[in-house]
Amino acid sequence: MFGKITAAFQESRQLIKRSLEKYIIFSSGTKQLTLTKRMVVLLCQQAESRVEQLKSLEPHSEEGLVATIEYKKIQVQLHFTPEKITLHEDCLEGELRLLKPPQFEAESIVYRYLIAGWTTFLGGKLPNGALPKEVRIENNKVYYTLPRNQLQLLDDLFHSLENGSALMTNLKEGDLTIETSVALSWNNFKLQNLLQLLNLK
């Protein structure tokens, strides 16, 4: 009896893995995974629908993402790429690099909307439209700090990593590659939660 239950559980996990393989490219035991362009586009659409000021968010054909933000009836286009996310016990610190200067000198509120879109992209829930206040801009870099418990996608993928772990990110041709300092396996991921996040259930 126990053997049948175990077999059914293993078969269920295999089915979930096969469903996710269109969205996540991953080899067990490696230190990186790739969210495919299909997944990136889906996450962009979710971010667009949840952040009112974010008029569009889409992968650039070569590198990064292009966000169009409306602020005081002015549209600002930001071309950026995520570079690094550091996980701490109660928060995470992130770093985005602007690939092109924005169309005009924007107030930092525009960058908060960018971070709000990026947060939502990562599976974040922004309560009552609240925007992250911890946004710092230095030259072509945008730094932000967010509560760790707000980002469902990162938690589903990397909940087993230790505090202080850094995720190096690279977004080329629509695919988001994430490198970690430790080897990963499918057992590290909250597969059921990922299916719900992607609305595959």
Image: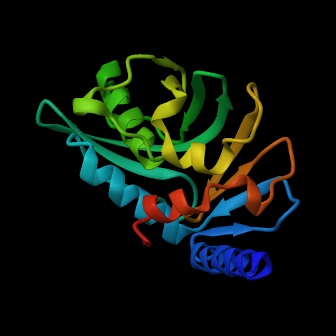
- Name of the residue lying farthest toward the front: 1
Where does residue 43 sit, x and y in percent of width and height? 43, 57
Residue 75, placed above or below residue 28: above
Residue 156 in the figure: left or right of residue 102: right
Residue depicted at 28% across the width and 31% down the height: 127
The structure residue drawn at horizontal position 64% and vertical position 51%, both measured from the top left corner, is 157
Depth check: 187 or 31 in front?
187
At 50% from the left and 61% from the top, the residue drawn is 40
Instruction: Give left or right: position of 129 versus 189.
Output: left
Residue 119: name its quadrant: top left
Q: Quadrant of the C terminus?
A: bottom left
Q: Position of residue 84 (x, y in %)?
A: 66, 36
Residue 32 can be seen in this image: yes
Q: Nearer the viewer, residue 30 or 117?
A: 30
Q: Position of residue 11 (x, y in %)?
A: 69, 81
Quarter of the image for the N terminus: give it. Answer: bottom right
Q: Position of residue 181 (x, y in %)?
A: 84, 41
Q: Residue 37 versus residue 43: which sits nearer the camera?
A: 43
- Looking at this view, name the residue that lies furthest to the left: 73
What colour scheme was applied to this rendering of the protein? rainbow
Q: Is residue 70 above or below residue 193?
A: above
As drawn, 137 above or below 195: above
Question: Taking the image as drawn, is residue 102 in sight?
Answer: no
**Residue at 28% from the left image edge and 26% from the top image edge:** 130
